[in-house]
Image: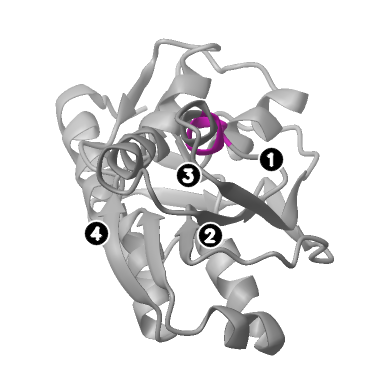
Amino acid sequence: MRLLSTKTLSPSIKDHLAKIGTSIVEYPLIKIQPLYLTNQKIQPMLIFTSQNAVRLVNKNNTLKNKIAGKKSFCVGEKTRELLKKFGFKVIEMKENANELANFLVEKYNKNSFSFFCGRKRRSEIESLLKKNSMTIEIHELYDTLFINKKFKNPYDGIIFFSPSAVLSFFENNKWPKDSHGFCIGKSTAEILKKYTTNYSEAKHPNEDQLLQTIINYFSKHYVKK
């Protein structure tokens, strides 16, 4: 059973997959390019939707001091864990951007927000907050660059961790007819379904659920080649 991961996997996931007889090739299809922060107007509350944004804020001591003590809202368990590790106060975590946007509109519509993000991002948060006349400042910290790679070898499964990785894959490849896709979350699956219906989505957007999705699929469908 051969798997292609479009991101470097954690050691625990690789160990679990190896135990069930999986051969894994890791080839990251995106890379992060930090950007100079032009918008220095920081609002009282903070929004993070990616671990990349959290890491870049933490590396910028001037910015980190500016936002110290402010309340944070985020998307994803890993993002929350990283925020807490770096000393941020996390008020609420949601599994996707749409859920977080609706939560903020419902519970915090009188507040103002700074959204730390990448140049390529989904529009739900800023569009919904602006639609409801809420103040939101956008702070673009990085750009997501595609890595060009054409894959020639067949894979039984291809793992995606972000919409950008899906788009990067299809810059140089067509979907292999015998491959099954695995998506860590809803936003990634929404992009992949534009190219194929042969995929599974993790029940919750975290690595443990993604691993379980892979194991469940191949235990039911895999025939050794």
Neighbour tally class for label 3: few under 14, some 14-19, many 20 plus, Cα within 10 Å = many
Residue that badge 2 annotates: 8
Which numbered disc, 4 or 2, marks the residue that appears first in the sequence?
2
Residue that badge 3 annotates: 161
Secondary structure type for disc 1: loop
Q: CA distance from mark 1 to mark 2?
A: 21 Å
Residue 120: image tag: 1
Neighbour tally class for label 4: few under 14, some 14-19, many 20 plus, Cα within 10 Å = few
**10 and 138: which one is in front?**
138
- The answer to whether residue 156 is seen in the rendering is no
Instruction: Name which residue type carries label 4.
Output: Lys
Q: CA distance from mark 1 to mark 4?
A: 36 Å
Q: Is residue 34 left or right of residue 41?
A: right
Which numbered disc, 2 or 3, marks the residue that appears first in the sequence?
2
Depth check, mark 4 against mark 2: the one in front is 2
Q: CA distance from mark 3 to mark 1?
A: 15 Å
Residue that badge 4 annotates: 19
Could you tell me which residue is drawn at 50 percent across and 26 percent down? 131
Neighbour tally class for label 1: few under 14, some 14-19, many 20 plus, Cα within 10 Å = few
Q: Is residue 169 magenta?
A: no
Which numbered disc, 1 or 4, marks the residue that appears first in the sequence?
4
Q: CA distance from mark 4 to mark 2?
A: 18 Å
Q: CA distance from mark 2 to mark 3?
A: 10 Å
Q: CA distance from mark 4 to mark 3?
A: 22 Å
Instruction: Name which residue type carries label 3.
Output: Phe
Q: Is residue 32 left or right of residue 36?
A: left
Secondary structure type for disc 3: loop
Which numbered disc, 1 or 2, marks the residue that appears first in the sequence?
2
Pointers 2 and 3 in contact (C-beta within 8 Å): no
Depth check, mark 3 against mark 1: the one in front is 1
- Per the picture, the main secondary structure of the magenta-coloured stretch is helix
Instruction: Name which residue type carries label 2.
Output: Thr
